[in-house]
Amino acid sequence: MTREAVRAGFEEFVADIVDTAYDEFDVVAVLRGESGTSGRLLNRLLKNSRRLDQRVVRPELRAYRRQVLDQFEPVLAYAADGESDFEEYRDRIRDADVYLDHLRPSVRGDRRRTIEQAQLDRQRRLAEAARPLVESPESDFWAAAVDALDRDHARDLVQTHFTFTDPLREDPDAYVFETEIEPGDVFGGPLAARLPSVTVEYTDEVMRVLERAEETVVERALSELDRRFDRD
């Protein structure tokens, strides 16, 4: 199986999670939790929540999806490289990691090093679990899973290694997701340009929707996996 086919399978999985998360995302709940935003501006943002969704929420989740896919690239490169040691890919994998990029500035010292090492170990295990798929002669992701793995190992690949919200569950207070809203992008009109930009944190909401979406998509993937194994 080619790297491109493995990548396509992972991209489909990630896209499904992010699309499901977008459907669940509650921008109103995020704004109502913003105590630092002035009441007048908050009211205007709430009244324009649909435009805010289009101009802010959707682009933010798209960017997150792109980051997750980008972090998979060096992992996939290591999976396809049967000759090199993980240490040769360590820096590339660390620098591309989406969650290390979203660590709160207050996470430092031993705690940061512990989280970083846990992430590197997680990515190494993902690469090693995906390696049989890369080496399979099948060109379809699910066909390769059936060809290269038994049912239990294929289920473990989906449930344990393809999931990517584990860090949020393990250290929920270590990460921050926030964005800067320019009122002019949301409201339009000449007066909006005079309004100050607002930094909004949406960590709790993104954790909620991603974890719920991942559970939903994993169940769908496991059903498809069982269907493929039962057919063969």
Image (spheres, grey):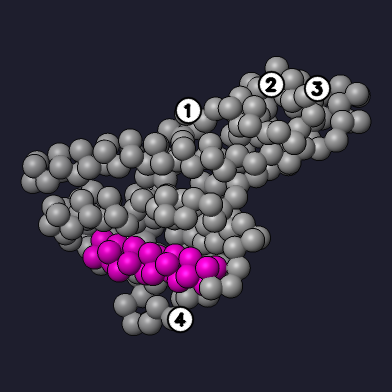
Mark 4 or mark 1: name the one nearer the start of the chain: 1
Q: CA distance from mark 3 to mark 2?
A: 10 Å
Decide if residue 150 is on the left or right side of residue 3.
left
Mark 3 or mark 2: name the one nearer the start of the chain: 3
Determine which residue is flagged by label 4.
88
Mark 1 or mark 2: name the one nearer the start of the chain: 1
Quadrant location of residue 186?
A: top right
Task: Say few, some or many: other residues with alpha carbon within 10 Å of mark 3 (under 14 / 14 to 19 / 20 or more).
Answer: few
Q: Position of residue 208 (x, y in %)?
A: 46, 37
**Secondary element at image label 2:** helix
Does the magenta stretch mainly form a helix, a strand or a loop?
A: helix
Task: Please state which of the two labelled residues, at mark 4 or mark 3, is closer to the viewer.
Answer: 3
Whether residue 174 is visible here, answered yes or no, is yes
Q: Going 86% across and 26% down the picture, which residue do you hit?
A: 192
Q: Nearer the viewer, residue 19 or 36?
A: 36
**Location of the N terminus (image quadrant):** bottom left
**Magenta stretch: residue 70 in it?**
no
Q: CA distance from mark 4 to mark 3?
A: 53 Å
Task: Say few, some or many: other residues with alpha carbon within 10 Å of mark 1 (under 14 / 14 to 19 / 20 or more).
Answer: few
Q: CA distance from mark 4 to mark 2?
A: 49 Å
Q: CA distance from mark 4 to mark 1?
A: 39 Å
Q: Nearer the viewer, residue 137 or 165?
A: 165
Q: Which mark is residue 40?
A: 3
Q: Position of residue 93 (x, y in %)?
A: 49, 68
* Three-letter code for the amino acid on which mark 1 is drawn: Asp
Task: Please state which of the two labelled residues, at mark 4 or mark 1, is closer to the viewer.
Answer: 1
Determine which residue is flagged by label 1.
23
User: What is the span of residues highlighted in magenta in the rendered image?
Assistant: 111-133
Determine whether label 4 and label 1 are within 8 Å by CB: no
Determine which residue is flagged by label 2.
46
